[in-house]
Image: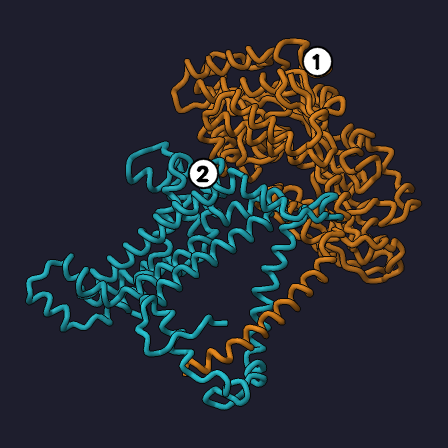
Chain colours: A orange, B cyan
Amino acid sequence: MRGSVRTGGGSKRRGTSVASTGLIAVALVASGCLGSGGDDTPADPTKNADATEFTLTITSNAIKGGKNSEGAEWIEDYVIPRFVEQQAEKGVTATIRFQPVGVDDAEYKSQLGLDLESGKGADIIDLDGIWVGEFAESNFIKPLDDVIGADVVSAWDGWDQIPESVQQNASYQDVRYGVPTGTDGRVIFFNRDVFAQAGLPDDWQPTSWEDILTAAQTIKDELPGDIVPLQLNAGTAMGEATTMQGFLPLLAAAGAEIHQDGRWQGDTAAVREVLELYETVYGTGLGDPVMQAEAKGRDRSFQLFTEGKVGMLLESDYFWRSVVAPGAEVAPMADRDEVVGYAKIPAITPGSGVNGQDFVSLSGGSARVINPNTEFPQQAWELMEFMNSFEATEEQVGAAPRITHRDDVNAEVLSGDPMLTFIAEEVVPLTLFRPGLLEYLDVSVAIQEATYAIIDGATVDEAIERYQSDLEAIVGDPDAIATG
Amino acid sequence: MTPMPSPPDEPPTVGPADRAGAIADVAPPQRGRRTATDVVGLGTARAVWFVAPAMLLIGIFLLFPALWTLYIGSTNFERTGPNHVNPEFTGIDNYTSVLSDPSFYNSLWVTLLFVVFSAVFGQNGLGFWLAWSLRRVDRRVRRTVETLVLLAWILPSSVVAFLWIAMLDRHGGTVNMLLDMPGTAWLVDYPLASIIIFNIWRGTAFSMMLYSAALSSVPPSHLETAQLAGATGAQTLRDVVFPHIRGHVLTNTLLITLWTFNDFSPFLITAGGPGDRTEVAAVYLYNTAIRDGDLGYSGAISLLILVANVVMALTYLRMLRKRSAT
């Protein structure tokens, strides 16, 4: 019995090897398909331009009752019905859908990348401005001029209202890929209740890092132990927030930009200064390192801030308008206007900030792009124009003011909100933007890991050594890294 | 193919595999080439047709992805950016750099601890203990315990992950309230221990069911004889029960080892953190591929993980075969 099985075995094995040779061949043929990114055939702007019936989908990392709830409400309750109405007046049947998402930005980005690569996804997509270059390099998105047609795009009167610096948020290498949707600024938020209990002033404005540390020490000395004086974003769990709402503003305060004069900041005095500040804050109990290691540590710090358990946070004005705003979903504070104070971020000592400034900030912003795979490019652009019109933008920020991309709207709405006026008038003029370079995203991860090393108990020397070697691996060229 | 057939009358000296080989060679091979040698008279050509669908499925769903992974692992393909549009062939670069990457060894070490403590000892031990001690208790008690244990197994991962995060929460978590230890951040201070205990809780049901079935195959007369002979509980287990269920122990250990090795649910609780302290192999792979977007590099990692899986499976299968041969 066994003998016969075995005799057959020889030929079976031969069959298998034939099959596997075939498979290798298939793999090698198919492997030619790897790469090429998104579809790189030229878009056809005139496709379906005369359709009397069309369907478009909008997506954004916003969801009613969750993340960026107001943004989702604006799209669902204002943009869609109004636009459909307008089209109906022209005798066109429009069906507009909103695809809400409410996840971490990194996950949202992965999803968009997969959608765009496979030729699917919503027709109008919200992106973080810092992803534009990466998506453009991957052929996931295309210049507006190619998707819609240069004459149509440049004919839009809205461009005149959008400052050049803000347009950069939706551009890559000076080519427009979409329409920016506003900008922001970073400040130090403080809880006035905590400050009052510690005997600190109501209108606090530090002029040096020393002032910040003194205030933190005062809170620590004067108040019970469960109150965290100063929580600086650090570590890997909160991703880009560590870089954008922590390390980079502090680096600017130490007098450096992360990418300056064609070189990345490696083991430099400024990077050391920032990591030493982290070490001081988290090594001497002025901040809570465990919270930074928790998966949802940033939300926790928001929560504790509203409960009067955190003294100071370095955050973007997003914190003011979407986190602690009365009626917000994350950590609303009914008495926000009285309790939440804000101050500009000081340089280490006056005049030692980047460009010799006394105060510094960082800004970002997002962009709305049109999916190059859309079936209705002209209609999508029409919808885009409508979403960025004066009326729609004013409606969007009417209930929840923010700095928009349109100067005419800003002039109207910001006067009602002293905090955003403060950002627009005092912070935005000081601000820096992140470098629009592909390596930035990897450098940002290296920064997060360096700050994680500090909260995990490493010394500044250990953290910076690892950071330097990570940076060398990312950048490759040693001349492109500044040291010393 | 087989070296010099040993004469059948020579006493078999080495392992059972050789003995099988020796028996195999007893059949006259020459005749087998010309006519069908199998019982049903199928012949080689038709036999190939019979196995072709199975081979095709294996080829499409197993071999092809493995080769594809091998190929991606030899490029610098990335999720986005220029290397996404025009990936380059980099040969074995990824493989050599993975093998010298401390993060890779960290993930292997974390996985080893996770597998050994949560599966091999934890689920195995607890599952057996539950099966053994529930043998003779009241049927209702037994059903209730079994249902509860099973529930932990069949609930969706995302749901149980949420429960565990809430339970281990630093502020107001159930565990801290029960133990009266406010402010202990279990997932930060004891992350690996937390996911090990989580996985024991989560996966014990399978071992429990398998051992319940296995224990019913132990003849009651043997147990009674042992009892009459005055054997202690430990002696009974060792000398009476264990020889009967050795095969089940091996099978169970193989299955839960492989499952746990490739388990992704720790990600739902700790996302690999803090730092990389719970970055088991599957999570390390996910973080490299999806979070960092290094698809080429992660292709190399997954191929190495695949090899590790195959080695583990083959080792166990060998042990099983050896056992069934004796």
> Disc 2 residue type?
Arg
Towards the viewer: B263 or B69: B69
The reply to whether the C-beta atoms of the residues labelled 2 and 1 are less than 8 Å apart is no
The answer to whether residue B234 is left or right of residue B17 is left
Residue B104 visible in image:
yes
Identify the image quadrant of the C terminus of chain B.
bottom left
Q: Distance between the residues labelled 2 and 1?
A: 41 Å
Q: Position of residue B248 (x, y in %)?
A: 31, 65
Please tell me whether residue A7 is drawn above or below residue B298 in the rendered image: below
Furthest residue toward top: A350
Do callouts 2 and 1 point to residues on the same chain? no
Residue A44, how many percent across, how many down? 87, 55
Residue at 31 percent across and 51 percent down: it is: B121
Query: On what subunit does the disc labeled 2 rest?
Result: B
Q: Residues within 10 Å of mark 1 (few under 14, many from 20)?
A: some
10 Å neighbourhood of mark 2: few (<14), some, or many (≥20)?
some
Horizontal and vertical percent position of residue B125: 28, 54
Q: Mark 1 lies on which chain?
A: A
Q: Circle 2 sits on which residue?
A: B277
Residue for point 48% across, 41% down: B105
A146 left or right of A399 in image: right
Residue highlighted by disc 1: A357
- Quadrant of residue A406 within the rendered picture: top right
Q: Which one is in front, B323 or B78?
A: B323
Secondary element at tag 2: loop
Determine if residue A233 is in view: no
**Which residue does the image show at 42% across and 75% down from the upper left?**
B5
Residue B131: horizontal and vertical position, in percent? 25, 62
Q: Is residue B138 above or below residue B174?
A: below
The label nearer to you, 2 versus 1, is 2
Q: In this view, does A168 lie above or below A47?
A: above
